[in-house]
Image (tube, rainbow, N blue to C red):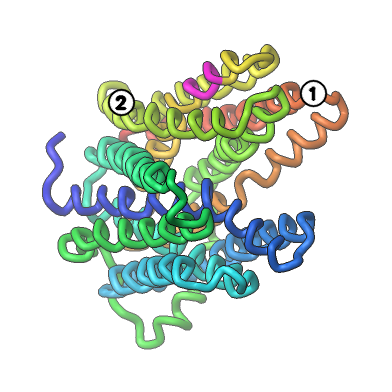
Amino acid sequence: MTLNKEQWSWVFYDWANSGYGIIVTTAVLPIYFKGVAESSGVAAANATAYWGYANSFGTLLVAILAPFLGALADYRGFKKRLMTGFASLGMVMTLGLALLPSSQWQWLLLIYILSILGYSGGNLFYDSFLTDVSDDRQMDRLSSVGYGFGYLGGVIAFLLFMVLEFTNGFGQLSSLAVARWGFALAAVWWIVFFIPFQRNVHQRHALDVASAPLKQSWHRVWQTIIHLRQHKYLAWFLIAYFCYIDGVDTIFTMATSIGLDIGINSTTLIMVLLVVQLVAFPFSIFYGWLAGKTSTRTGILIAIMVYLVICVDALNLKSTTDFWILAVLVGTSQGGIQALSRSYFGRLVPKERSSEFFGFYNILGKFSAVLGPILVGVITQMTGQSRIGAASLSILFVIGLIIFLTIPRSATGKS
């Protein structure tokens, strides 16, 4: 498959916001915030709690708004404007993190919450644009290339940040100042690589604008919920997706804690994170190729089986080498299962209402990693071993697998 200009522009939005994902959300801002808050007299436990509250509130806000925003975006001319508005909010707020004085930790949290809203809202519309820039035959490959280049872009952005840290070896800047330069890098990265999307990507499928679009959007969301049984395959897929993606996200979010439990230091954990992202780049694209040679359904089933192997093998997790092996296995299928799930769902939804349905998809994506961490926590406390807690995630993958297998092969026309 050769990508055209519009499709490459769509792909590079995933590349564009990847700097935010790894620099702001994952690697730098959590540590930066704790340092800022504690230097202002906030107890370490309270700083951790406030950080958790901010993440939960931002995620909850996006999840609640997602179906309504998606329904509104389905009207002709709205999707691009909403995409631009939310992405711009994320960019400006990320730049705000760099410019805000380090003593104002309360404002730092507020700006971060607004950046979550911009980042997650932008991703909702970005995902739904998949149905505009490709047909059903192209979705697997294009979705996989998008995820692959997103991982690669995140690695490059983070390596640029690491170069900044390395070149500060003589201490010209404080650690807080280096972090703020990292936030500025993430914002500029996002802005620059958003330009192709803004210029070249267009909404193809749309509903005619209603006389009262806001009111009609709410009405359509409720009607969809009430009549969801009319889309039974779509509903069953969402349930299956919620189960297995909960396991995928939990493995990623709990990996650091599990690694620390078996004695791996923080520097090695950062290296593992980068390697997982690098491995995910080619394997995400590979899963798109695999789906083209077999089917989307087969690709998702293989990815679920890989994760089941990861969960079972977690029982043998005792050394750094064991951790590296499991991390590489995660990298082989993390992007693939996300990419093919997105394209599989994209075939199921009515094209002119894709944003509305991707709003529901977004909700389940946001609320995933809810059951998983609880399951891991309970089993770990009961057994006293985090590796057994990690292995318990196999339950979620088995449930997701069973439900997914009940969906007929003909559900998407190419499944």
Q: At 31% across and 53% down in the image, what residue appears?
A: 16
Q: At 61% across and 59% down in the image, what residue appears?
A: 33
Would residue 31 be visible to someone looking at this image?
A: yes
- Secondary structure at numbered mark 1: loop
**164 in the magenta segment:** no
Mark 2 surroundings: few (<14), some (14-19) or many (≥20) residues within 10 A: many
Picture coordinates of residue 240, whole percent (x, y): 56, 38
Q: At 64% across and 14% down in the image, what residue appears?
A: 319
- Most foreground residue, 48 or 203: 48
Q: Residue furthest front?
A: 170
Q: At 52% across and 26% down in the image, what residue appears?
A: 304
Picture coordinates of residue 19, whole percent (x, y): 39, 51
- Most foreground residue, 193 or 141: 193
Amino acid at dot 1:
Gln
Which residues make up the magenta segment?
324-329
Label 2, label 1: how many angstroms apart (C-alpha)? Answer: 35 Å
Amino acid at dot 2:
Phe
- Residue 160 quadrant: top left
Q: Nearer the viewer, mark 2 or mark 1?
A: 1
Relative vertical location of residue 352 with respect to residue 219 in this rendering, above or below: above
Would residue 124 be visible to someone looking at this image?
A: no
Mark 1 surroundings: few (<14), some (14-19) or many (≥20) residues within 10 A: some
Give the mark, 2 or 1, whose residue is nearer the N terminus: 2
Picture coordinates of residue 177, whole percent (x, y): 48, 60
- Secondary structure at numbered mark 2: helix
- Most foreground residue, 375 or 251: 251
Q: Which mark identifies residue 385?
A: 1
Residue linked to disc 2? 286
- Most foreground residue, 36 or 272: 36
- Residue 410 quadrant: top left
Relative side of 99 to 354, left or right: right
